[in-house]
């Protein structure tokens, strides 16, 4: 991995959208990554044209997925999925290495419109967040689950890392619509932007890695809870992350390097090679046709409308149309 040292020179001034930048602050024993998304997140959210609150929530899930998926050390997929009882009953974000992302939401439009609050908890309600790592056909799938109970996706991510990976982690996610005057004076143009930052405490010494037991369980009454004082370096790391404002994660004019320099210049921050991300679905006419052919003939017949079979990809909203006579499965020939 190539690396450059920021303190020895001025940070890069040119902001690059649709990138993930890994970094390390050795003096604090922390590593992390920043994400800034422009055209990529705008393409995904604009294609769906969901209500604004739903778009913002799905944008957060996209940032979180990019933060986590880009840390995979192998070729594969990372899938983030929520299932909850609120107005937004499902979010799905699918990452394919080295950086292709697609996403969709399922929601009750009336319930979303009737909402008075638009926090993550208002939209999601209660249920769970699942993170699935899929390394391919011959490999095991790994799935981590964390409860969603009215809090934010950021909080759910903290919980996931503490329980599943036992790594102290702080995550910041930000999504906003940017308004600008359209060329030619045709009214305001709206574009989605998103950004995020993840910081993890990864000390080399075992002693400093200790975390407090999650719960004393059924210890006798009066037993002092097991408390491990937080490491000073991690206390400072968390405090610095807490100062990051949404606008700093979203500002198209603020480069990632400059943001990291702002946060960590006292300690020295090393920045690693950026990873590019793009919006790309994996659907195609041929793939949808293969799926249709695998259905029983009766199911396909039930899909015919006005003499055609139409299928819309949930992930990217692309519509595929087929002549029913040309879609024939293997079992039809036997009949
Ligand atoms: Zn698609």
Image (spheres, rainbow, N blue to C red):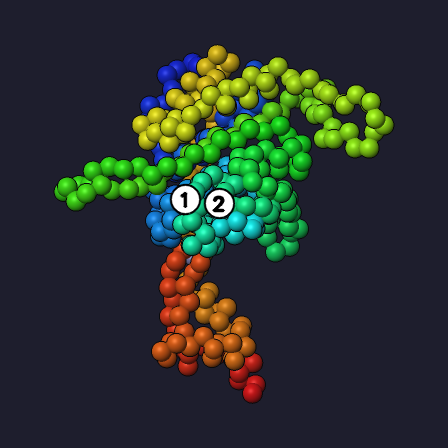
Residue bearing the label numbered 2 = 123
Picture quarter with ligand 1: bottom left
Q: Position of residue 137 (x, y in %)?
A: 61, 56
**Numbered badge on residue 139:** none
- Which residue is rendered at x = 37% and y = 64% of the image? 319
- Which residue is rendered at x = 37% and y = 16% of the image? 10
Q: Position of residue 86 (x, y in %)?
A: 52, 49
Q: Is residue 4 left or right of residue 12?
A: right
Q: Position of residue 222 (x, y in %)?
A: 82, 22
User: CB atoms at circles 1 and 2 under 8 Å apart?
Assistant: yes
Residue bearing the label numbered 1 = 53
Q: Is residue 210 left or right of residue 46?
A: right
Is ligand 1 closer than 8 angstroms to the Cβ of mark 2? Answer: no
Residue furthest out toward the bottom: 335
Q: Nearer the viewer, residue 321 or 110?
A: 110
Residue 76 appears in the rendering = no
* Residue 278 picture quarter: top left
Residue 179 appears in the rendering = yes
* Residue 195 picture quarter: top left
């Amino acid at each position: 991995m190539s690396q450059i040292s920021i303190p020895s020179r001025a940070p890069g001034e040119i902001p690059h959208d649709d990138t993930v930048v890994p970094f390390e602050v050795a003096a604090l024993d922390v590593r992390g990554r920043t994400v800034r998304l422009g055209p990529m997140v705008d393409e995904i959210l604009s294609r769906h044209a969901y209500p604004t609150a739903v778009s913002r929530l799905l944008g957060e899930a996209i940032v979180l997925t990019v933060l986590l998926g880009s840390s995979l050390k192998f070729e594969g997929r990372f899938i983030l999925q929520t299932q909850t009882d609120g107005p937004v009953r499902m979010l799905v974000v699918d990452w394919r290495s080295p950086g292709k992302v697609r996403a969709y939401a399922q929601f009750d439009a009336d319930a979303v419109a009737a909402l008075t609050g638009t926090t993550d908890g208002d939209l999601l309600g209660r249920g769970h967040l699942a993170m699935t790592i899929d390394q391919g056909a011959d490999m095991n799938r790994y799935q981590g689950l964390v409860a969603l109970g009215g809090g934010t996706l950021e909080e759910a991510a903290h919980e996931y890392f503490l329980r599943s990976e036992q790594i102290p982690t702080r995550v910041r996610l930000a999504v906003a619509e940017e308004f600008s005057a359209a060329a030619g004076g045709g009214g305001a143009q709206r574009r989605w932007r998103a950004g995020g930052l993840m910081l993890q405490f990864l000390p080399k010494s075992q002693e400093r890695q200790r975390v407090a037991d999650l719960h004393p369980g059924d210890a006798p009454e009066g037993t002092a809870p097991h408390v491990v004082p937080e490491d000073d370096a991690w206390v400072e790391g968390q405090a610095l992350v807490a100062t990051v404002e949404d606008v700093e994660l979203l500002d198209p004019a603020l480069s990632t390097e400059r943001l990291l320099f702002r946060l960590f210049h006292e300690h020295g921050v090393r920045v690693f090679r950026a990873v590019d991300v793009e919006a790309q679905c994996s659907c195609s006419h041929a793939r949808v046709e293969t799926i249709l052919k695998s259905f029983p003939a009766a199911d396909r017949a039930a899909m015919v409308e006005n003499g055609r079979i139409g299928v819309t990809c949930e992930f990217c909203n692309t519509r595929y149309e087929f002549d029913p006579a040309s879609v024939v499965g293997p079992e039809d020939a036997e009949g």
